[in-house]
Image (cartoon, helix red, strand yellow):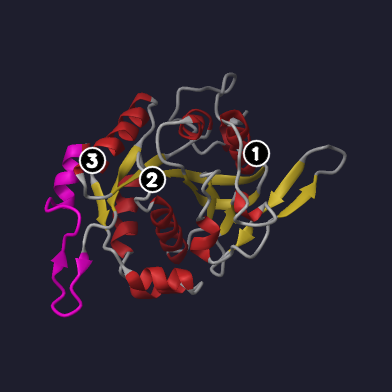
Amino acid sequence: MGNCNTCPSKGSCNSNETSCSKTVPKYGNIKNIIGVISGKGGVGKSTVTGLLAVQLKKAGYSVGVLDGDITGPSMPRFFGINNQRADIKQVADTKDVKFSPVETSSGIKVISLNLLTDEEEQPVIWRGPVITGALKQMYSDTEWGELDYLLIDMPPGTGDIALTIMQEIPLQGMVIVSTPQDMVSMIVKKVVIMAQKMNVNIIGLVENMSYINCGKCGEKIRVFSKKSAEEQAEYIGLPLLAELPINLDLVESMENGKVESYIMESGQYDILLDNFKGKAH
């Protein structure tokens, strides 16, 4: 369990020096831990995690990413590091191991189950307790070093992983990801209510795939709903951090392994960081 003096949540949780339910990493010091989650799969929470990580790095922060979607890890593909593998080291005089994360081209530290298996397509056929155990080990036994931010890309829904992260990891807050459809918003609201019941701070909502820009006139064309992002955020009950378009240039940059330089140079996602920092602190 954690030491309150080194815990990012010191002073903001109900635990105390003698009875702490939170776990802190063994090999590093992390100032801020942020979860990125949605109630629904396929809304782009991994993309939002990567966008936010790169924007924070661009702003001069030291950043790590924990790929918490154990059965569907995608962060190595996002950063173009899927052909690399994390080092697994034996801890001297023990049976324990520690993981050395893979660093992206801009220096973001990433740990993912896909960086620990021989082949990225290899499926994980595990039951819940084993999955949560793997998540906790990757969090606690990775050599994170000194980080300003650790972002956790969480699986969708209100299951074991979400519960474990909200209960056992000292989160400063969570970013919720949605898409414009009413059906998605309804399911996303379940995660919001869960976080509120767990007394986890919610920083705000990112609406992904909100629109496409017309290549000729620049008009925003809403594909999935005529409702604005502000209306959807109001229904979910959260402040809106950003509405993000469907962007084929971003997709192409990921496929070519150049996503970090694209995000840093395009300036299209600066508003996400500005609003995040404004709500997170």
Number of the label disc, if any, that sits on residue 183? 3
Q: Residue type at mark 2?
A: Gly
Q: Quadrant of the C terminus?
A: top left
Q: Which residue is mark 2?
A: 41
Residue 125, by quadrant, is top right
Q: Few, some or many C-alpha atoms within 10 Å of disc 1 (few <14, some 14-19, many ≥20)?
A: some
Point 55% across, 29% down: residue: 22
The answer to whether marks 1 and 2 mark residues whose Cβ atoms lie closer than 8 Å is no
Residue 142 in the image, given as x and y percentages of width and height? 66, 47
Q: Earlier in the sequence, mark 3 or mark 1?
A: 1
Residue 74 in the image, given as x and y percentages of width and height? 51, 55
> Can you say whether 137 is above or below 110 in the image?
above
Q: Residue type at mark 3?
A: Met
Camera-nearest label, 3 or 1 = 3
Left or right: residue 221 compared with residue 275? left
Q: Residue type at mark 1?
A: Gln
Residue 242, by quadrant, is bottom left
User: Which residue is more in the foreground, 66 or 72?
Assistant: 72
Q: Earlier in the sequence, mark 1 or mark 2?
A: 2
Residue extending farthest right = 93
In the rendered structure, does residue 219 fall within the stretch colored magenta? yes
User: Which residue is more in the foreground, 20 or 102?
Assistant: 102
In the rendered structure, does residue 2 fall within the stretch colored magenta? no
Point 30% across, 69% down: residue: 268
Point 41% across, 57% down: residue: 47
Specify the segment rendered in magenta: 212-235
Q: Which residue is mark 1?
A: 137
Q: Quadrant of the N terminus?
A: top right
Left or right: residue 110 compared with residue 258? right
Point 36% across, 31% down: residue: 195
Residue extending farthest bottom = 216
Q: Is residue 145 in view from this perspective? A: no
